[in-house]
Amino acid sequence: MNWEARADLVVVGTGVAGLTAALQARQLGLRVLVITKAAAGAGNTRWAQGGVAVVLPGQHDEGDSVAAHVQDTLVAGVGLCEQDAVEAILADGPTAVTQLRALGAVFDPGSDGKLARTREGGHSAFRVVHAGGDATGAEVERALLAATQDGRVPLLDNHIAVDTIRTPVGAVVGLLVLDPNGVPGIVSAPAILLATGGMGQLYQATSNPEVATADGVALALRAGATVADLEFVQFHPTVLYTGPGARGRCPLVTEAVRGEGAVLVDATGSRVMQGVHPLEDLAPRDVVSAAITRRMTALDDDHVFLDATHLEAELFRRRFPTVLAACQSVGVDPSVDPIPVSPAAHFACGGVVSTVDGRTSVTGLYAAGEVARTGLHGANRLASNSLLEGLVVGARAAHAVAADLAAGLLGDPKTAVRGGLPSAPVADRDMLQRVMSRYAAIGRDAEGLAVVGSVLDVSTVDTMVKTKQRVEDAALTLVARALIAAAAARTESRGCHVRTDVPETKESWRRSLAVRLNPSGQPVLAADTLLRSAA
């Protein structure tokens, strides 16, 4: 290797979870190094629009409570949330948001002297605090990045993690990394925190940026970790429709627009959600996305409309400036015209199995944020719980690393088994996205999932992983295989996982499917590690 760096904790990713962990670890006296494969701030966090779901003391609606927030989360998760995890994360939410505000994050004030609050799908109360109208993620990212600018949190941008480095007994003690020029180096540390975000680039159209290529899940699988709930990919119901065949990141139309009274209609003007769910347009996202998909199929159309014309133009401009700019870019005036929308890949409810403290099944490897499966989301994430999870679990993971270091529980980087750049199966990204979008999105069946597997089998080539694109494509290839293995095995419909050949939800499937790599490097169901739901 051509270069080397050392730390107590290496954080991979610069979103809400990664930066929160890095700042907390620094406060605990750890030597921290942050790496990110693009520019700092290029990840998912800054694109989050709606807000942070949290019940703040003195700021919440009368009758609302953390217990009510827990119940809404459990209902949205359709039986697969881990209740202890939900309670722990949501109970820590008020402290996490208070600490974020202390770092300088500014949330929108309300007319009642409290923070402004909105309601989103699946919530029983107005408890989602927001910033910049619909630019909450951007404000969260701004505040966290600003807090790292004092020089005490070193950051290597445009550095991509290729593989973990382990000891002879399998503890993770570092990373193999490519620098901006593609030069390989070693980052040694007894603790690695994956905070790499999601996997939206598995699909042709997504709300995620280009960097969301499932890197963290792939790193964890290759390190011997367990992943679970990968089949539950949440499709946001209302991504701005920009025309047939839209590709890449598509502008989000935040759920908060529906929280302010907007309704979904089809091309004939008929309501989409009326009679589908008691909450109608504020039903959980999996319900709304599935209803939109059914209506589009019935009408042989590729989009529906979100009618927000009841909102005055000035109110829409002030409350939803990001959405307004996106609409104007395609010639839509939301105060006059219904907004064309369609579902698109948005959030990975599953990921690397971890505790609420970020610990995974591999010594020295931690996970926080969207890359992790803590048990908070179950089969479908409740709106605006993701930023909260990043804040809470990021901070808790830093404390876990400090405790594990102090207790001597982690591996020694001096005993690392080092190797060169690995080879990995790589599929053509365009082909992979096309078959995943066609057969593994909303509405799957056994035959279609088998097609995805067959296409990947015949088109995948073992390739030396020596460039950023190859690292990403290898990650997408591996995680696509893991996802379809879980989706094929789950012979029911639940939450984000909709099987057209088995539309019913079965009590016998009220459990999470765990996946690991077998000795040949293929993702397989780990029958001995099926995770039983506690809620």
Image: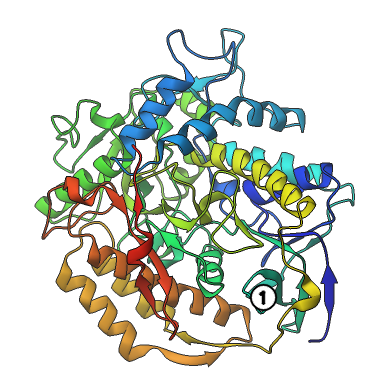
Quadrant of res 187:
bottom right
Q: Which residue is pictured at 33% across the width and 28% down the height? A: 309
Residue 476 placement, left or right of 147: left
- Point out residue 24 in the picture as x, y percentages from the top left corner: 76, 42
Give the colouring mode of the picture.
rainbow
Q: Quadrant of residue 455?
A: bottom left
Q: Nearer the viewer, residue 84 or 287?
A: 84
Dot 1 surroundings within 10 Å: few (below 14), some, or many (20 or more)?
many
* Side (left or right) of 385 relative to 509: right
Q: Quadrant of the C terminus?
A: top left
Q: Nearer the viewer, residue 142 or 197?
A: 197
- Quadrant of image for the N terminus: bottom right
What percent of the width, then of the height, locates residue 44? 56, 52
Q: Relative to 467, does residue 400 appear above or below in the rendering? A: above
Tell me the element at label 1.
strand
Q: Nearer the viewer, residue 328 or 402?
A: 402
Q: Amino acid at mark 1?
A: Arg
| Image position of 470 with respect to 118: above or below | below
Residue located 52% across and 14% down the image: 60
How many numbered discs sit on the rendered protein? Answer: 1
Q: Is residue 195 left or right of residue 482?
A: right
Q: Is residue 144 left or right of residue 243?
A: right
Is residue 245 something one can see in this rendering?
A: no
Q: Position of residue 335 (x, y in %)?
A: 38, 30
- Residue at the spot 17% in from the left edge and 54% down from the top edge: 492
- Outermost right residue: 151
The x, y position of residue 291, in whole percent, is 19, 43
Q: Which residue is mark 1?
A: 166
Examine the rendering and report whether any part of residue 259 can be seen: yes
